């Protein structure tokens, strides 16, 4: 009897991570596990994601409130485009060295929406590696931008998720490139929305570029400190780390555009459709931004 | 096909012993045979202990002779502090291979293998998903010997499943275990006056209570559940939250850089941080436990309740330490009780509670007034004043209603003491 060659047990021969997934062990059927989600324990102050109502609320009442109401004097239109129930993926442009746009979008939904809902902000994994940040970031409702995390939030938990498809390319860009969107990643966010069959709500944010303009990237300091990037802003790095919070009082305008719905099953497997949709979303945000900037009379007073 | 003739490998481990005890209560199981190098550490009623390590030729003879249909492997070492990495490798990788070898081959009677694994399979890294599900592999190659062992052991189980399509193979990946009776490095750390942390990191932890571990193994043994399942209580806690539940402060004594060096310095003064734990102390880990719930398993404890149960135990521990007598396996006595023709009714453990008695216990009123309002430490201080019959009733009631391990343990030791004093004059 000719045996098939035995797979050696050494790990190098095994595709790492796939080692335990031989056919007779179905790792996971496509079953709906939503009803098995853990229940809420009212005694807890943190969610399973590490979000802390206490820390978030404290910051919301103080710093975020101050910036939203008095410093940036945020103006919101189209808030009705954010669905009151069910999952939805908010997609926004991104800018500023320590971007204030995410917290302003979250605050806008809490303040203006008839059904205020928590917003989950996706951030890059490297925050988890920075001491201090790693502790604080999840408490404020930020989750790592892992496809599995986004899917669980959108599909299983039916929550709002905010993504910045420009990612780091958006926050790195210089003042001269303001309001010109970078490449939208690889369309992973569209795939996530399609897989979870939730709408995408494009969001345009005007004002963040002027609130913290980046004049240059300091490559040498970046190498020395090992940080992601060391931008030169009006207050950083010469005023120290707190200079990262030094925003200029630009007028903030947020516009939530009409949602794009994906109701068919299996759309995410069509890569062409994913890319087309990603371009479409990007074009809508870009168009909205140009429209808003064109109508703006003053950077500081709107 | 229900399991009727079960072989437990690793009977002397805490899990092997607990599982054997749990399976003994099921009358549909004909035979429970446990193998290990060392003697059982818990009292067993009808489980037969055979002193065999993981030599596959010997195991094969046991399996064939007893017509074993189900093998439950509880031996995996998942805590590198308990033994040397060479011994752990021997046990985890070579041992698993040998046990699987004893189940393969033409005409083997084995139809089900349940393998106890660990969520250390997934590791702890910066770019991990917040909840690992069973289909996700390990994103990065393993960095510590124990994790490498776990991956290799699981790989050989998967290969076995691949080659033996008629055998039902279940892998259970358990989260960090907490409970009053089990000892792990993590529980050692939680027993310290303050919970040690890495400065600037607040990892997410998920736990499973020791009773849930036993029930999960039992659940897989009694059903046909091919595949991999995560076993972890509901809820993922931040470590600061755990410290709060334990009622302890947290101490960020490990620096964020040079953590390994600091840990090796602390090891000198007796604080052991196994290397797989350091990664978890930094990045934490969450598991998606829904698949095993969908398979019909119900957890007795959430992560939070598991921590609270541990906290209760840690507070009681100083009171109970002296009263607990460790069990010792006496080969001659066990053999006499099992096989001597003169034994008429001795094989029953005097204190075992049958399922019927448990139901009766549920219905009856508490043996002590306002019993339900008492705290465990109050109950324990009360125990010494009770008569043996009242103790038995109390134990039954506690078992049926609250099931607090600490209280039951205290009652047991009180009963044992009263029996010893009864028999002493006659002996």
Image (cartoon, helix red, strand yellow):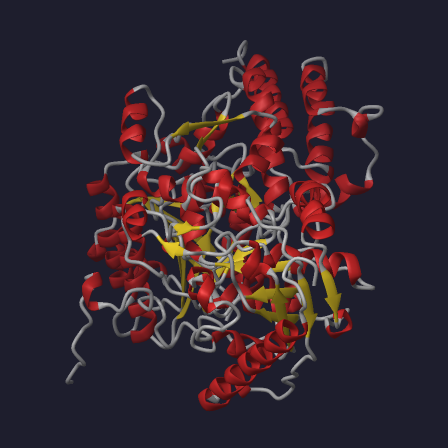
Residue B324 visible (yes or no)? yes
Location of the N terminus of chain A (image quadrant): bottom left
Q: Is residue A154 above or below residue B19?
A: below
Left or right of A67, for residue B133: left
Q: Is residue B339 above or below residue A271?
A: above
* Residue A208 quadrant: bottom right
Q: Farthest front residue?
A: A297
Left or right of A106, for residue B21: left
Location of the C terminus of chain A (image quadrant): bottom right
Find residue A242 and report its horizontal and vertical position in percent: 51, 39
Q: Residue at x 38, y 61 (%)?
A: B68
Q: Residue at x 69, y 28 (%)?
A: B392
Q: Is residue A193 above or below residue B379?
A: below
In-front residue for pair B339/B65: B65
Find residue B297 and report its horizontal and vertical position in percent: 60, 59
Q: Residue at x 36, y 66 (%)?
A: B110
Find residue B331 and report its horizontal and vertical position in percent: 36, 33
In-front residue for pair B42/A291: A291
Find residue B287 and report its horizontal and vertical position in percent: 51, 56
Count of labels in the image: 0
* Residue B154 quadrant: bottom left
Residue B12 visible (yes or no)? no
In-front residue for pair B341/B410: B410
In-front residue for pair A1/B341: A1
Q: Residue at x 54, y 9 (%)?
A: B425
């Amino acid at each position: 009897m000719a045996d098939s060659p035995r797979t050696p047990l050494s790990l190098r021969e095994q595709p790492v991570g796939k080692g335990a997934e031989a056919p007779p062990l179905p790792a996971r059927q496509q079953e709906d596990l939503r009803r098995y989600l853990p229940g809420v324990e009212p005694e807890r102050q943190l969610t399973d994601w590490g979000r802390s109502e206490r820390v978030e609320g404290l910051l919301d009442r103080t710093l975020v409130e101050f910036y939203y109401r008095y410093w940036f004097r945020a103006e919101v239109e189209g808030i009705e485009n954010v669905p009151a129930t069910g999952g939805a993926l908010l997609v926004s442009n991104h800018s500023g060295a320590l971007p204030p746009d995410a917290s302003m979008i979250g605050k806008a939904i809490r303040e203006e929406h008839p059904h205020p809902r928590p917003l989950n902000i996706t951030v890059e994994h490297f925050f988890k590696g920075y001491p201090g940040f790693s502790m604080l970031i999840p408490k404020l409702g930020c989750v790592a931008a892992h496809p599995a995390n986004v899917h669980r939030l959108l599909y299983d938990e039916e929550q709002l998720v905010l993504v910045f498809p420009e990612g780091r390319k958006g926050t790195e860009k210089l003042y001269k490139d303001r309001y010109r969107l970078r490449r939208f990643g690889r369309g992973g966010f569209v795939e996530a929305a399609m897989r979870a069959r939730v709408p995408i709500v494009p969001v345009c944010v005007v004002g963040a570029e002027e609130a913290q303009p980046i004049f240059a990237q300091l490559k040498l300091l970046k190498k020395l400190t090992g940080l992601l990037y060391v931008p030169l802003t009006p207050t950083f790095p010469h005023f120290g780390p707190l200079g990262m919070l030094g925003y200029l009082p630009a007028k903030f305008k947020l516009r939530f555009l009409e949602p794009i719905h994906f109701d068919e099953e299996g759309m995410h497997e069509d890569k062409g459709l994913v890319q087309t949709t990603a371009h479409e979303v990007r074009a809508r945000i870009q168009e909205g931004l140009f429209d808003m900037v064109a109508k703006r009379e003053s950077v500081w007073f709107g | 096909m229900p399991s009727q003739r079960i072989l437990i490998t690793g009977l002397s481990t805490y899990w092997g012993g607990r599982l054997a005890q749990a399976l003994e209560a099921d009358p549909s199981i004909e035979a429970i045979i446990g193998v290990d190098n060392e003697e059982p550490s818990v009292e067993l009623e009808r489980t037969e202990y055979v002193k065999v390590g993981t030599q596959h030729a010997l195991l094969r003879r046991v399996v064939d002779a007893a017509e074993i249909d189900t093998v439950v492997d509880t031996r995996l070492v998942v805590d590198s502090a308990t033994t040397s990495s060479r011994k752990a490798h021997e046990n985890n990788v070579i041992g698993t291979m040998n046990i699987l070898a004893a189940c393969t081959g033409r005409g083997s009677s084995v139809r089900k293998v349940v393998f106890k694994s660990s969520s250390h399979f997934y590791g702890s890294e910066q770019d991990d998903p917040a909840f690992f599900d069973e289909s996700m592999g390990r994103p990065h190659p393993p960095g510590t010997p124990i994790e490498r062992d776990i991956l290799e052991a699981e790989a050989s189980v998967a290969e076995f499943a691949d080659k033996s399509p008629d055998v039902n193979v279940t892998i259970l990946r358990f989260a960090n275990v907490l409970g009053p009776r089990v000892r792990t490095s993590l529980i050692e750390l939680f027993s310290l006056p303050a919970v040690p942390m890495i400065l600037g990191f607040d990892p997410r932890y998920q736990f499973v209570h020791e009773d849930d571990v036993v029930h999960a193994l039992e659940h897989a043994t009694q059903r046909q559940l091919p595949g991999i399942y995560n076993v972890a209580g509901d809820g993922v806690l931040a470590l600061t939250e755990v410290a709060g539940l334990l009622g302890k402060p947290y101490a960020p004594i490990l620096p964020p850089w040079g953590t390994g060096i600091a840990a090796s310095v602390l090891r000198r003064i007796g604080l052991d941080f196994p290397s797989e734990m350091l990664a978890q102390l930094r990045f934490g880990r969450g598991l998606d436990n829904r698949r095993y719930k969908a398979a019909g398993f119900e957890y007795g404890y959430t992560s939070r309740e598991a921590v609270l149960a541990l906290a209760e135990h840690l507070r009681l521990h100083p009171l109970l330490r002296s009263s607990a007598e460790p069990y010792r396996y006496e080969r001659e006595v066990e053999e006499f009780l099992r096989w001597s023709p003169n034994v008429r009714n001795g094989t029953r453990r005097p204190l075992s509670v049958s399922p019927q008695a448990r139901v009766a216990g549920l219905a009856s009123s508490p043996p002590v007034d306002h019993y339900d309002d008492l705290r465990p430490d109050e109950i324990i201080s009360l125990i010494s004043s009770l008569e043996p019959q009242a103790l038995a009733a109390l134990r039954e009631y506690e078992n049926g209603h609250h099931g607090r391990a600490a209280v039951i343990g205290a009652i047991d030791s009180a009963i044992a003491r009263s029996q010893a004093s009864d028999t002493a004059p006659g002996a």
